[in-house]
Image (cartoon, rainbow, N blue to C red):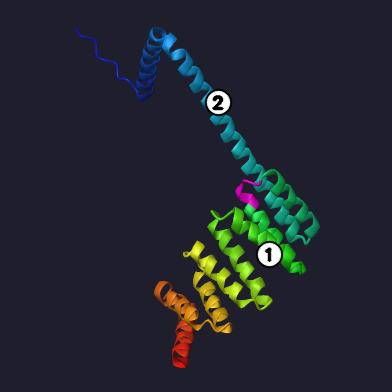
Amino acid sequence: MLKPRKRLVKSKLKEDKLVTFTVNTQMFVNKNSKMLGIGIGAVVVIIIAVSFFNMSSNSAEIQSTFDEMMARDAYARGEFDETLTRIDGILEEYSSTNSAASALMLRGRIYQQSGDVSAAEEAYAEVVRKHSSEEYLSFGANVSLAIIAHGREDYSLAADKYIDAVNKNPGHFNAAVALLEAGICLEKVSKYEEAKRTYLRILKSYLKSRSADKARNNLAELEFMG
């Protein structure tokens, strides 16, 4: 009489497969030990190096994020000197992390609020130059540069920075607003054809935005002027 077959649960199946794989691997290694010696050693070194790099990168990101939070806490408390000191530390120790771009934006905001426009411009320009892959922050930095230029009545530069912001991140929720401001700046320096093209861009790409009506009215006025 045949004995009933034992029912194997999933854990047992996994265990059996693991044993089979381990045995087969061991046999293969024993058979080809000389040929595999150098290759396996190199692979082990690579694995260790990659693991160490990933651990270091993750550690840097975590620490820089924590430092950024502390800097923002100091900023919220009005401790601007402490904020700038913490920002300097982030930029010195973790310049390649995502927090570095945010720290630069915060530095620019502090300098702009304190009236040190040149230092603010430098911080925003560094965001654009070094962290262009951070599209959201790059947009904000270009807009901040445009606002500063507008404040000193450099309307051509302001328009360029507004347009740069949109070109970099056309999907930003303030893209249409930036283009509208660019068009207005272009009108101030009598660059009417460029202003028209900017308004038309709003009507083409951001028709449902709140800026579309204003762009349509401004365009109509320019067309009326000839």
- Residue sitting nearer the eye, 69 or 15: 69
Q: Is residue 72 above or below residue 28?
A: below
Q: Is residue 197 above or below residue 17?
A: below
Q: Which mark is residue 35?
A: none
* Relative horizontal placement of residue 84, taking residue 105 as reference (left or right): right
In the rendered image, the residue lying farthest to the left is 1
Q: Amino acid at mark 1?
A: Glu
For disc 1, the marked residue is: 121
- Residue sitting nearer the eye, 216 or 192: 192
x 60%, y 56%: residue: 129
Query: What is the x, y in percent for residue 68?
Result: 68, 51
Q: Is residue 125 above or below residue 163?
A: above
Q: Amino acid at mark 2?
A: Ile
Query: What is the x, y in percent for residue 47?
Result: 52, 26
The quadrant in which residue 29 appears is top left
Query: What is the x, y in percent for residue 105?
Result: 66, 59
x 55%, y 60%: residue: 136
State which region is magenta.
95-100
Q: Is residue 179 above or below residue 100?
A: below
